[in-house]
């Protein structure tokens, strides 16, 4: 059955093949009847986005293809099929576009058509201008722009009209050489000649801050007057090299007319007033004495948070420094609140009086130097400390230089003829020391260096409660040398006969000294210095760390070239009259050469300010003080400060407020002149002493 099927299929195929016959198609006479190309034209569609994109659509009769010559350079062309178009980008200008139409007969026709491409001016130009100090940052957006140019209005540069270029979503930055008012011009460019321009006036300058003078050309000394006041920068009426602020309170000005210093945002940082740091000073040149000057501080973000106080001029037509105490605000005004962010200040000249044409000059607004209350040890060398003393019984005490070392400040007390046998001097003001003298029932020793004109003279020391003079204890020591310094020690647990006994439950915070006690004044002169509480000797190596013990083992471990030994004090003067100190020699080795000492137990960081006395051969040496865990060196904390004195004792302060007190620290590491390689010379020899927590 299958064989029959295959046979029939083959027979049918043969029949089909046999029946096919080839025919010839070589008659092209129909071409002679096709029309020649004619009526060639072109349509231009220009995209309205300033890209220069043009859609070219050629037309014509009897055309199969077109040659399109763009006309913007060269004789090249692009072929376009009939009924199609092509796109091309042009720069702004006028062009001759040639269209050549090709018929199927091989004949051609052409046309030249003018094309004008003109760009629209950019629209909706928006700029962003940000100033920071002497710098400006410019950004811009616009429709139909290709790029932006910015002209900074800065004629001080080499190019009289400099500009930067930037694209949309970019910015341009420029630094001005000095503060001032500038006109910047921002130009949005199209693809051609059409542009759009905006101008903006900007004020450039660093934001003012304290201390405020008016001499630095980098700062913006804008002021804001109110109540018809008038202010402007001017030349100091007494010094034509100094710039100041001149303020006129003209006729018609309000009684409350004033001037706000700086812009609306005030100072760059908060004014650091507090209950203990509450005074500001300002130099004033006034036309008359007895005029009220009001100084008002406020938060620029909240004008309700204010404090203000007054001062009065005392001289006319001369400079004077007025002090404004914000702990004593003006009557009826808010009290000082240290929680507020005072960062703006206004000055009211001749406050409370209508304007009459008075002219004032002001300069140098700043925080007043805060004078610290006296505290132990009393050295008379610490800066900004009130070393006032109070004489009684006709004593006479003055500031003086050490008779053996002119650089050391001391007190000089004369007991003149007619002075009482009990004549004396109270150390400090009647308020005494800033802290209680740390006496205990079993230990209370104080010392004082004395330079006496004779040996065998009685020197009495009395301590008391400054609030209650009936609470006191006093004792004596005897001078042993003449015309030389010696350290007298006063054991207050053994008071002088007939005087009250020591009571450790009492507060003793005031001290008085009586030279040549019991003898009437006869002109004897005494120099004295370094009144201190003598710390109780410790049997445990820890903080506070000094080097006075004869039994403790001050075992330092040196590394990388450092070498520490305990030696005699090379300069027992100023703030450190200890007999023993530590000496660090930085030999050749690593830049971080130093030494460490392991303490008997963890340091108690209840107090987080470490202090150390240092005697350095140079100013500006980096001193690193680091504490570590005894067994895990990764548990550590360090601070580095710079020396400020050469060949003199000073006390350096290390802020440990950020230390993690959950960890324990038993090692003290010291590196002097950190970052420099030592050579073992005197220039790399340091002394240190009295590492304490405060």
Image (tube, grey):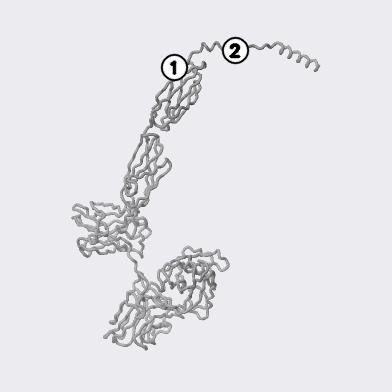
| Figure quadrant of residue 648 | bottom left
State the residue at coordinates (30%, 52%): 222
User: Is 78 positioned to the left or the right of 453 in the image?
Assistant: right
Choose between 338 and 603: the one closer to the eye. Answer: 603
Residue 495 image offset from top left, x and y in percent: 40, 84
Choose between 665 and 677: the one closer to the eye. Answer: 677
Say which quadrant the N terminus sits in.
top right
Q: Pointer 1: residues within 10 angstroms few (<14), some, or many (20+)? A: some
User: Is 99 positioned to the left or the right of 261 in the image?
Assistant: right
Q: Is residue 13 above or below residue 548?
A: above
Identify the residue under disc 2.
26
Residue 432 image offset from top left, x and y in percent: 35, 74
Considering the numbered disc 2 on the image, is that residue within a helix, a strand or a loop? loop
Q: Is residue 403 visible?
A: yes
Considering the numbered disc 1 on the image, is that residue within a helix, a strand or a loop? strand
Choose between 307 and 566: the one closer to the eye. Answer: 566
Q: Which mark is residue 208?
A: none
User: Is 511 positioned to the left or the right of 20 in the image?
Assistant: left
Q: CA distance from mark 1 to mark 2?
A: 31 Å
Choose between 14 and 443: the one closer to the eye. Answer: 14
Residue 325 image offset from top left, x and y in percent: 30, 63
Q: Is residue 142 above or below residue 681?
A: above
Q: Is residue 441 visible?
A: no
Q: Which mark is residue 39?
A: 1
Residue 482 image offset from top left, x and y in percent: 36, 87
Count all numbered tags in the image, as a single digit: 2
| Foreground disc of the pair 1, 2 | 2
Mark 2 or mark 1, which is nearer the start of the sequence? 2
């Amino acid at each position: 059955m299958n064989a029959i099927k295959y046979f029939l299929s083959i027979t049918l195929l043969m029949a089909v093949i046999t029946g096919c016959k080839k025919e010839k198609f070589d008659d092209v006479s129909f071409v002679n009847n096709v029309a020649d190309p004619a009526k060639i034209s072109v349509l231009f569609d220009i995209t309205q986005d300033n890209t220069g994109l043009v859609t070219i659509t050629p037309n014509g009769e009897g055309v199969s293809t077109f040659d399109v010559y763009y006309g913007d350079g060269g004789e090249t062309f692009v072929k376009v099929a009939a009924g199609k178009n092509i796109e091309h980008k042009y720069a702004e200008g006028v062009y001759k576009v040639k269209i050549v139409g090709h018929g199927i007969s091989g004949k051609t026709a052409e046309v030249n058509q003018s094309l004008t491409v003109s760009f629209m001016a950019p629209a909706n130009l928006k700029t962003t201008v940000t100033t920071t100090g002497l710098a400006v940052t410019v950004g811009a957006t616009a429709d139909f722009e290709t790029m932006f140019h910015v002209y900074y209005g800065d004629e001080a540069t080499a190019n009289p009209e400099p500009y930067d270029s930037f694209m949309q979503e970019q910015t341009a930055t420029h630094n001005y050489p000095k503060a001032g008012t500038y006109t910047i011009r921002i130009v949005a460019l199209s693809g051609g000649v059409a542009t759009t321009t905006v101008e903006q006036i900007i004020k450039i300058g660093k934001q003012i801050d304290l201390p405020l003078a008016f001499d630095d050309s980098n700062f913006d000394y804008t002021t804001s007057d109110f109540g018809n006041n008038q202010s402007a920068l001017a030349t100091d009426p007494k010094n034509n090299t100094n710039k100041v602020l001149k303020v006129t309170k003209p006729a018609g000005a309000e009684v409350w007319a004033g001037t706000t210093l700086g812009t609306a945002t005030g100072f760059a940082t908060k004014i650091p007033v507090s209950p203990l740091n509450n005074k500001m000073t300002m130099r004033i040149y006034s036309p008359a004495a007895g005029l009220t000057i009001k100084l008002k501080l406020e938060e620029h973000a909240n004008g309700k948070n204010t404090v203000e106080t007054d001062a009065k001029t005392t001289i006319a037509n001369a400079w004077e420094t007025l002090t404004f105490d914000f702990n004593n605000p003006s009557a009826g005004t808010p009290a000082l609140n240290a929680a507020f962010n005072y960062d703006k200040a206004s000055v009211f000249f001749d406050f409370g009086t209508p304007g009459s044409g008075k002219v004032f000059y002001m300069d140098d607004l700043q925080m007043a130097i805060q004078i610290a209350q006296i505290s132990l040890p009393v050295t008379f060398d610490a800066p900004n400390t009130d070393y006032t003393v109070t004489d009684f019984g006709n004593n006479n005490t003055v500031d003086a230089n050490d008779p053996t070392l002119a650089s050391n400040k001391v007190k000089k007390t004369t007991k003149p003829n007619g002075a009482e046998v009990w004549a004396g001097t109270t150390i400090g003001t009647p308020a005494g020391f800033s802290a209680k003298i740390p006496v205990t029932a079993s230990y209370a020793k104080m010392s004082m260096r004395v330079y006496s004109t004779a040996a065998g003279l009685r020197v009495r020391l009395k301590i008391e409660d400054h609030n209650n003079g009936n609470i006191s204890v006093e004792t004596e020591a005897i001078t042993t040398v003449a015309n030389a310094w010696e350290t007298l020690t006063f054991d207050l647990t053994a008071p002088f006969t007939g005087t009250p006994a020591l009571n450790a439950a009492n507060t003793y915070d005031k001290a008085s000294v009586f030279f040549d006690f019991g003898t009437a004044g006869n002109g004897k002169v005494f120099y004295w210095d370094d009144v201190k509480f003598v710390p109780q000797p410790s049997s445990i190596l820890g903080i506070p760390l000094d080097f006075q013990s004869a039994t403790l083992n001050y075992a330092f471990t040196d590394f990388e070239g450092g070498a520490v030994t305990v030696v005699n004090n090379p300069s027992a003067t100023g703030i450190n009259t200890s007999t023993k100190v530590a000496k660090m020699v930085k030999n050749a080795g690593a830049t971080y050469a130093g030494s460490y000492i392991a303490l008997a137990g963890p340091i108690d960081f209840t107090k987080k300010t470490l202090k150390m006395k240092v005697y350095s051969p140079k100013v500006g040496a980096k001193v690193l003080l680091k504490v570590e865990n005894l067994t895990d060196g990764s548990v550590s904390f360090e601070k580095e400060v710079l020396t400020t004195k050469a060949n003199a004792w000073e006390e350096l302060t290390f802020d440990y407020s950020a230390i993690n007190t959950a960890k324990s620290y038993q090692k003290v590491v010291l590196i002097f002149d950190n970052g420099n390689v030592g050579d073992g010379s005197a220039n790399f020899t340091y002394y240190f002493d009295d590492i304490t927590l405060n």
